[in-house]
Amino acid sequence: MFWLILYVAINIIATIIMYSTGELIGDTKGNQVFDNSMLLLAMVSVISSYVVICYFLFKLFKKVRVTKIQVYNEIGTHNKLGLIILVSQISFLFFNYINGVNIAGGNNIRTDSIFAIFWALFPVDALFLIYYAVARDSKYFKINLTAYLISSIARGWAGAFLIVIFMEFCRLYRSKSIKFRYVLFATALLLLFYPVLNSIKFYVRLGMPDGGIAQFLDESYLSSIYHGVLHLIERIQITSVLVEVIRIKDTLGDAFSSGAFSPFWHEGLHGIIYDRLFDIPKKFPLSVAFTEYGSFNWVFEVGNWNTNTSLASWFFIAPSLSVFYVFYILLICFFSYFFMMKISSKDSAKDLLWLSWLFYVIPPWFGTFIQFIYALIVFLFLKILISNIYKKRAV
């Protein structure tokens, strides 16, 4: 509940900032708020999405009973999974370094390496997060976590730290180890070091230019902290982009009707496979296509980055698909719940599931969420396979 309130509060604060300045923030920074009533509509739509999905729907699904798979020698199975994921993370890190791919903000960079197919079928980041949620006591956990954070930093993605903070916060909260002074101290540390982390992120994304990370800091470090807090608000809130979506909803609706970008149900591995099988040209999802139609204050190559259009965006772009859209959201959320509960019914597993809805469904990153569901299936398969090997050896 704390994190839900936090995300809702950040969107409210962002709305107040935009209302008072008359200017959008975040990815759409520099654009004027064209209508205050639309700003309010966007905020209400975003907050409603958070509350409906991350509170009411999640609470409803928690009442559904799913039988967890029976595993022989679960400790040994988790240790073997941890070793497999560790080797995979290290290999993935070297693959990205050698080929210069999978860097945040570099979506147009591709490689012809045959190993790229393997990493698409073996989503190691998502597999580690599932391992984190269900096997934190594994002897390979700490080194796996270190590898995950190093890999994330090397790709210019700071969101990994937020995931770790969330997971550890939930664990400590349940054990009643959370004290207000600890939260205050941790928050102060985050604000103090965030400018450095953010500078490292941009330094990596821009190809490590001359001048080091210092060039991304303000002359005054206090000023860097202030802009760091503002940047956190801008990155977490999704209200501003929805305002822009509402402004050009007719343009986006016409583009979608003409097939200019892919529908929400086509995002993900299944859509890629379908296109390859029938030799269909690749189309951008809404999160990428929007960067072509929206108004931004910098020059970029379309396809090189994406943005959070928010879950409510499709209701404005294709209102005739609203019923099917709601059904699709319910379906993929249920699949994620079902497969996670088959793997583990631990509270930490539910924590990660909830976070995946917050991070992937609300923005919405349907392609990433489908990948997460696929990773759950892969993890479940590996867990059953390793368990059966242990069982046969014991006979």
Image (tube, helix red, strand yellow):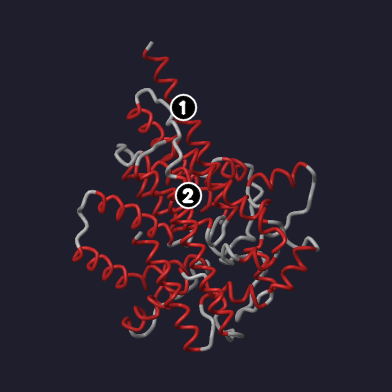
Q: Residue at x 66, y 70 (%)?
A: 301
Name the quarter where the N terminus is drawn.
bottom left
Q: Quadrant of residue 10?
A: bottom left
Tell me, for residue 93, which label it has, or none. Answer: 2
First along the sequence among labels 1 and 2: 2
Tell me, for residue 384, which label it has, or none. Answer: 1
Q: Residue at x 45, y 50 (%)?
A: 58
Q: Position of residue 115 (x, y in %)?
A: 60, 42
Q: Is residue 269 above or below residue 229?
A: above
Q: Which residue type does callout 2 highlight?
A: Leu
Helix, strand or loop under label 2: helix
Q: Quadrant of residue 141?
A: top left
Q: Which residue type does callout 1 highlight?
A: Ile
> How many C-alpha atoms fall within 10 Å of the one at disc 1: few (<14), some, or many (≥20)?
some
| Residue at the far top in the pictured view | 395
Which label lies toward us, 1 or 2?
1
> How many C-alpha atoms fall within 10 Å of the one at disc 2: few (<14), some, or many (≥20)?
some
Helix, strand or loop under label 1: helix
Does residue 287 appear to the left or right of 21 in the view shown?
right
Q: Position of residue 252 (x, y in %)?
A: 72, 69
Q: Position of residue 333 (x, y in %)?
A: 53, 48
Q: Residue at x 33, y 58 (%)?
A: 165
Mark count? 2
371 or 330: which is nearer to us?
330
Does residue 182 appear to the left or right of 149 in the view shown?
left
